[in-house]
Image (cartoon, rainbow, N blue to C red):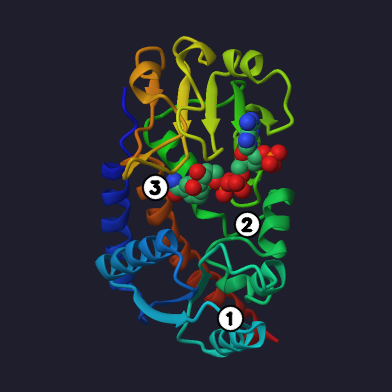
């Protein structure tokens, strides 16, 4: 069965739009794009469109490839101080002369819509309320939408980035899956994959997961986005693996739209955290 990320995301966007329309103040997301990376430009365009669909305002900052660290930090600082900005998103990757960690961690954790500051990642690690990175959050939402039980299941996450693999492993663990994380130095990947009830590929290599690596009836989540001959494909050999898996995400129309939907949900989460922060300040 196909896990339809597109359809699920449309339902979420509709729900977010309803919620946004009922809030006492308008919401706005600041999006900072440095340089002209074509993939990043497409991602930013999609995020802006989704915000428009949900009634969330956008402040877009397009900076040249050679923007300085100071310029980027100044924009973040201005957005941190501006109460009418609820979320701040720095599109990654940044050009190599910019210090990504420093820039991301300059974002107020209550406006960290991508959940990438060490505060939100630490909160996630601790099982505390946190803004979650959009892709792992979207994967969990999709699994829940199809009532896929994770408790006690063997989950293999291939990929250990801070953006996808690590936070997704923590979220699966929170849902009581038995989680293994594989990466480029893993020596027995095929053996691990064949034992997985839940198999997540977040590698960035087309057809990396072949049918002989998949357990019968496994749930297969394809996070990968790769361009092959002008077409977007995932990490999984979809045509062959769909015959074996019980559930599988397609690419496109799988995890990608769920990421965008989760981003919109996160703008509301940020807003709620800011309101809570203001209420706490008023109490003191
Ligand atoms: N659908 C979406 O919305 C969405 C969102 C974000 C990312 N993505 C896509 O998801 C993929 C992963 O993204 P990312 O940001 O996590 O990428 P990343 O930072 O490049 O991480 C890739 C991971 O794959 C591992 N890997 C590479 N070769 C491997 C191999 N031969 N065997 C096992 N593991 C291997 C790497 O291991 P090491 O750590 O050992 O190097 C690394 O942990 C990319 O295709 C990206 O475009 C999609």
Locate residue 155 relative to residue 134 in the image: left or right.
right
**Which residue is pictured at 56% across the width and 90% down the height?**
78
**Which residue is pictured at 65% across the width and 47% down the height?**
161
Q: Nearer the viewer, mark 3 or mark 1?
A: 3
CB contact under 8 Å: marks 2 and 3: no
Q: Nearer the viewer, mark 2 or mark 3?
A: 3
How far apart marks 2 and 1 lie (CA) works out to: 17 Å
For the question of whether residue 123 can be seen, the reply is yes
The spot of residue 132 in percent (x, y) is 57, 55
Does 148 sit above or below residue 114?
A: above
- Tell me which label, 2 or 3, sits earlier in the chain: 2
The spot of residue 267 in percent (x, y) is 45, 67
Frontmost residue, 252 versus 169: 252
- Tell me which label, 2 or 1, sits earlier in the chain: 2
Residue 279's disc number: 1
Q: Which residue is mark 2?
A: 129
- Tell me which label, 3 or 1, sits earlier in the chain: 3
Q: Crowding near pointer 3: few (<14 within 10 Å), some, many (20+)?
A: many
For the question of whether residue 165 can be seen, the reply is no
Quadrant where the image shows the N terminus: top left
For mark 2, give the secondary structure.
loop
For mark 3, give the secondary structure.
helix
Does 96 sit above or below residue 247?
A: below
Q: Quadrant of ligand 1?
A: top right
For mark 1, give the secondary structure.
helix
The spot of residue 89 in percent (x, y) is 51, 70
How far apart marks 2 and 3 lie (CA) works out to: 24 Å
Counting labels gives: 3
* Ligand 1 neighbours mark 3 (CB distance < 8 Å): yes
Q: Which residue is mark 3?
A: 256
């Amino acid at each position: 069965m196909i896990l339809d990320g597109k359809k699920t995301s449309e339902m979420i966007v509709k729900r977010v739009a309803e919620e946004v329309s009922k809030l006492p103040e308008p919401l706005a997301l600041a999006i900072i794009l440095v340089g002209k990376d074509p993939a990043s430009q497409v991602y930013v365009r999609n995020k802006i469109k989704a915000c428009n669909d949900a009634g969330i305002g956008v402040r877009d900052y397009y900076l040249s490839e050679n923007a300085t660290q100071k310029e980027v930090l100044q924009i973040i600082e201005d957005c941190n101080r501006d109460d009418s900005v609820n979320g701040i998103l720095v599109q990654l990757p940044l050009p190599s002369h910019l210090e990504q960690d420093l820039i991301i961690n300059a974002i107020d954790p209550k406006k960290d819509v991508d959940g990438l500051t060490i505060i939100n990642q630490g909160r996630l690690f601790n099982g505390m309320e946190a803004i979650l990175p959009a892709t792992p959050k979207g994967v969990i939402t999709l699994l829940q939408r199809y009532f896929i039980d994770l408790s006690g299941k063997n989950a293999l996450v291939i990929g250990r980035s801070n953006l996808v693999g690590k936070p997704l492993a923590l979220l699966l663990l929170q849902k009581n899956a038995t989680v293994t994380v594989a990466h480029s130095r893993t020596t027995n990947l095929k053996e691990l994959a064949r034992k997985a009830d839940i198999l997540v590929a977040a590698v960035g290599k087309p057809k990396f997961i072949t049918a002989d690596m998949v357990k019968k009836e496994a749930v297969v989540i394809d996070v990968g986005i790769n361009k092959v001959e002008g077409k977007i494909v995932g990490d999984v050999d979809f045509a062959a693996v769909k015959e074996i898996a019980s559930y599988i995400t397609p690419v496109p129309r799988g995890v990608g739209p769920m990421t965008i939907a989760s981003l919109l949900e996160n703008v509301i989460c940020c807003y709620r955290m800011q309101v809570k922060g203001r209420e706490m300040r008023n109490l003191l």
